[in-house]
Amino acid sequence: MKTWKLAGVAAVVAFGGLLGGCGDGDIKRFIELDTMKAQAFKDGGDDCDKMAKTYGDWKSKYGKEYKELQGKLKDKYKDKGDAEKAMGDNAAKMKDNAKAVIDGMFKCASNDALGKAIEAD
C-alpha cells in the first residue's frame, strides 16, 4: 500500500474514531465494535498476514454495522467540540483503539493483503 494512502486512511481512522465515540444509545455498541476492530489489529502481532486475516474477518462480520453507526454518530455530532464533550469517559478507550489500528497499519504498510483489506473500506 502506498505510504501516502496509508497516512490518509490512518487520519480517517483516528478522526472517525473520535467522532464515532460520541454518546447516545448507540455508543455502547460502537465502542464494542471499535474495540474488537482494534483487537483484530493487535491479534496480528508482528505477523502482517495474520493481521490482514484477523482484520478481514472482523470487517466481513462487523464492517457494515460499524460504518452505519459511525455515520449516524458523525451526523449527530458534526461539531468536533460537541463530539469531544459527548465522548466523556470513553475518550481514552477510543484513543487507545485508534492507536492500535494506526500502529498496525504502519507496522504492516507494505503488506499487500492488509493493504487490500484496508483499501476496500
Image (cartoon, rainbow, N blue to C red):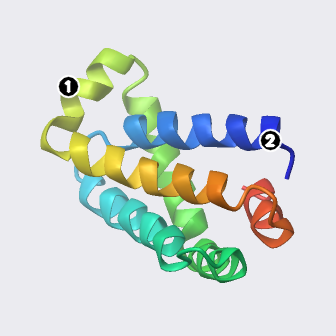
State how far apart marks 1 and 2 are (Cα). Answer: 33 Å
Q: Nearer the viewer, residue 67 or 49?
A: 49
Seen at 53% across and 75% down, the residue is 45
- 103 vs 89, left or right, is right
Looking at the picture, which amino acid does disc 2 mark?
Answer: Thr
Quarter of image, res 117: bottom right
Name the quarter where the C terminus is drawn. bottom right
Indicate whether 44 appears above or below 103: below
Q: Which label sits on residue 8?
A: none
Q: Residue furthest front?
A: 46
Q: Nearer the viewer, residue 2 or 68?
A: 2
Q: Position of residue 51 (x, y in %)?
A: 62, 75
Seen at 39% across and 37% down, the residue is 18
Residue labelled with disc 1: 85
Indicate whether 39 appears above or below 19: below
Q: Position of residue 22 (x, y in %)?
A: 29, 39
Sequence-earlier tag: 1 or 2? 2
Q: Position of residue 108 (x, y in %)?
A: 70, 62
Total marks drawn?
2
In this rendering, the label closer to the viewer, 1 or 2: 2
Q: Position of residue 69 (x, y in %)?
A: 45, 52
Seen at 43% across and 22% down, the residue is 78
Seen at 74% across and 55% down, the residue is 109
Residue labelled with disc 2: 3
Provide the secondary structure element on which disc 1 rests: helix
Looking at the picture, which amino acid does disc 1 mark?
Answer: Lys
- 3 vs 81, left or right, is right
Provide the secondary structure element on which disc 2 rests: helix
How busy is the neighbourhood of tag 2: few (under 14 within 10 Å), some, or many (20 plus)? few
